[in-house]
Amino acid sequence: MQTHHRAVVAERFGDPAGALSVEVVPTPKHEEQDVLVRMRWAAVNPSDVLPIRGAYRSRTGLPFIPGFEGMGVIAEGQPGEGSRVIPIGLPGAWQEIRSVPRRWCIPVPGDVPDHAAATAFINPLSALLMTDSYALPGGTALINAGSSALSRLLAYLLRRKGMYVIGVGSSGNPHKTVWDDYKDPGLMSSGKARHSVDILFDCVGGIEGLELASAVRKGGAYVHYGLLSGMPSIRQLTDKRADVGVHLFKLRDVVHTASDHRIHELFDRSFDLIRQGMATRIAATRPLEDVVAAIILSVQRPTRGKVLLRV
Ligand SMILES: NC(=O)c1ccc[n+]([C@@H]2O[C@H](COP(=O)([O-])OP(=O)(O)OC[C@H]3O[C@@H](n4cnc5c(N)ncnc54)[C@H](OP(=O)(O)O)[C@@H]3O)[C@@H](O)[C@H]2O)c1
């Protein structure tokens, strides 16, 4: 007998208020290689809102169920029933029941609370991977969107590797220093930053990314990992700063190519970050039906943490 469940569905691209509706959709049949997961909590991240607005039209088919991150339990009648898991690799977290390839269901350790598990994937794994690839002990890193959840984690990990870290910016004032542990405090505001930092981590792009790139020293690195401004900067950057190494980071590429062993090792480190008090702050929770209000809240108050959907 066909069963049904509630899901947030994007019927068209555009503003979430017009693009999204909560619908009753058919529950997928259980396939041998898959696991049916009853979702409990799903995060609202910038990477969820961009495809709804139509940023990746060429690779996003309509209609689709958004949500790249969340946690739930293995549904009734399956091996491991009731075990907590984090589904990864595909969108679809914003619904009650989803089908996930077994290898993409990460078990949640008993000492990791639900809310922490629901945000243990995207930002922690990105911060760990970028730190592993680019950290330069004794060097200086500049990070924009300094109040974001990811920049907080990235700064923590880079410091642990012995880097000095400067966090700048917000949507209101991209040059404002949010935190600064550089040996010369006030480096950014004094205008002395030109060609002085080793690595820029840019998740804004556009004019801000280009301007901040002038702070990177010759032979330094520009790591581009987000597009909060909605405007690209890489092409102009390679023209303007041919003396800087440009790197594009996409967690998706790693998740889709890494071995299961590597993914589990990264999650072990993410769970350790939670144990060290670095769980993502949760600002608010909202029921699935209030998805549009949850998105608005996530954009208005990001500095106070993430918004979770209660599925
Ligand atoms: N490449 C990858 O694989 C990957 C993985 C994870 C995350 N990311 C990216 O990392 C970024 C941060 O994610 P998050 O989850 O940490 O975000 P978040 O906690 O929701 O915070 C969003 C941040 O963006 C700032 N912001 C918003 N619009 C802006 C604009 N137009 N110009 C400058 N700043 C703006 C906000 O500043 P105010 O609060 O001051 O407005 C806030 O600091 C996003 O771009 C996300 O897509 C990329």
Image (cartoon, rainbow, N blue to C red):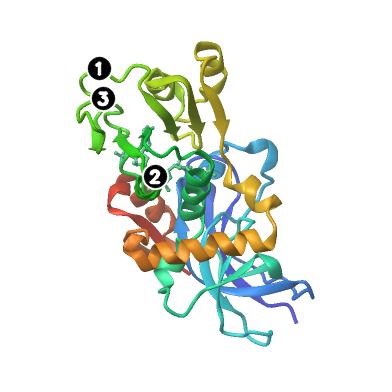
What secondary structure is marked by label 3?
Answer: loop
Kindly tell me whether residue 284 is visible in this rendering. Answer: no
Q: Residue at the front extreme?
A: 138
Q: Are marks 2 and 1 in contact (CB under 8 Å)?
A: no
Q: Secondary structure at mark 2?
A: helix
Closer to us: mark 2 or mark 1? 2
Q: Which residue is mark 1?
A: 191
Q: Position of residue 87 (x, y in %)?
A: 59, 65
> Looking at numbered disc 3 in the image, what kind of residue is underneath it?
Met
Q: Amino acid at mark 2?
A: Leu
Name the residue at 55% across, 55% down.
Answer: 68
Q: Which residue is mark 2?
A: 158
Choose between 175 and 309: the one closer to the eye. Answer: 175
Residue 258 at x, y percent in the picture: 68, 53
For marks 2 and 3, the one nearer the N-term is 2
Q: Nearer the viewer, residue 282 or 165?
A: 165
CA gap, disc 1 to disc 3? Answer: 6 Å
What is the C-alpha distance between the residues marked 2 and 3?
A: 19 Å
